[in-house]
Image (tube, grey):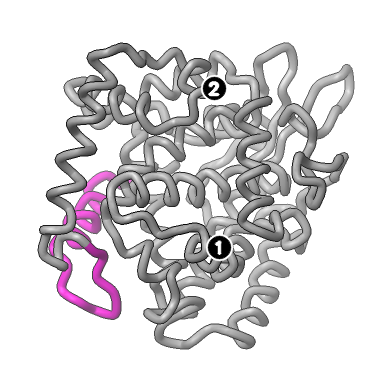
Amino acid sequence: MNSTPQAFYHSIQQLAAQRADPDHGFFGPQTLVWQVNRERINYLGGLRAILMQLAHPAVAQGVADHSNFQQDPLGRFVRTMSVVQDILFGPADAAIKAATRVYAKHARVKGILSGGSAKSKDAFDLDSEQSPAPFDCAGHESTGESGHFPLRSGCCPPDTGKGGQQEYSALDPELLLWVYATLIDSLMFIHDEILPPLGDENWARLYDEGRPFAYLFGVPDAVLPPTLDDFRSYVRGVVNTVVVTDTARGMARAVIRSPHPVFGISNTVLAAGTVPEPLREAFDLPWNGAVRAGYAVGIGVLRVAVPLLPKGLRTHAVNGENDPIARLKTHYLKKHATHS
């Protein structure tokens, strides 16, 4: 992966020249990536993905140090999904700009973890237009569970600085891969939980089609698990070894109570029912009879109701289609112009 946003921009321009359509971008209506990601119900996997991301100590600390996540978790989620939609559904130019903007922001997100706490290095406004300095993505790689791709054992923050302090960088390939993996794994989970299961063959096709998305997200080809089976082994390996920190638990409580504490009960049920069991226990989420029943009823209703929704409500609009929900999102982004 290239070391500067400028170099990254040029590399994805080359990728676009090889495979992107000017109007449909890097994917298009013929791909499963496009078809599956248009389903709005996938948003329900967002809470699962966020908690899985926060489970990684370096991701949690980076978010805590460099964003207003705890004050505005919903806003951060909306902005993140807006970028994801630009990359997935936007024309090539929009996808390239969105990917480069995120890469440039991540290039300045770095800090030091020591004794369970962290000090921010080069703290900055994540929406600044400054050109970030080059970053260091040193490896320290070992073989992952599948034996085919790099994975640091234990998912620890990667680099050790002076005095045994551990450093993190948002452009560390391990962290980029984990954040990307939470999005894909949560997409697969929530889709098959509510909609007719896609099946391993189709998920494998979608995973392969989605490689450009991983690259646009900043994930180097060398660390991306080569097959869907390898990818699932990687996710299981991280889930079973990661150590959830108090910082992560605090942010998890904030997101579960977003956008208002009244949503705390429903979000707790959704989180407890969807996150992998080891993380449910690590985040101290309840899984008693009442929570299980609430989750089963909620999912049961969605399985019946979602297929009956009109297309305009069920799927994202693309290519200028009229979309009232997208207009509400745009209104929200303009009204709540906080940055994260």
Say if 279 sits above or below 62 in the image.
above
Picture disc at residue 204: 1
Residue holding disc 2 = 278
Q: Residues within 10 Å of mark 1 (few under 14, many from 20)?
A: some
Quarter of the image for the N terminus: give it: bottom right
Callout in the foreground (2, 1): 1
Residue at the image position 23 percent from the left and 20 percent from the top? 265
Residue at the image position 54 percent from the left and 56 percent from the top? 102
Q: Residues within 10 Å of mark 2 (few under 14, many from 20)?
A: some
Residue 113 showing in the rendered view: yes
Compared across the picture, whether 268 is left or right of 129 comes to left
Q: CA distance from mark 2 to mark 1?
A: 25 Å
Residue 100 showing in the rendered view: no
Task: Please provide the residue range marked out in magenta.
Answer: 315-337
- Mark 1 residue element: helix
Say if 322 sits above or below 2 in the image.
below
Compared across the picture, whether 75 is left or right of 55 comes to left
153 or 165, nearer to the observer: 153
281 or 6, nearer to the observer: 281
Q: Magenta stretch: residue 331 in it?
A: yes
Q: Magenta stretch: residue 170 in it?
A: no
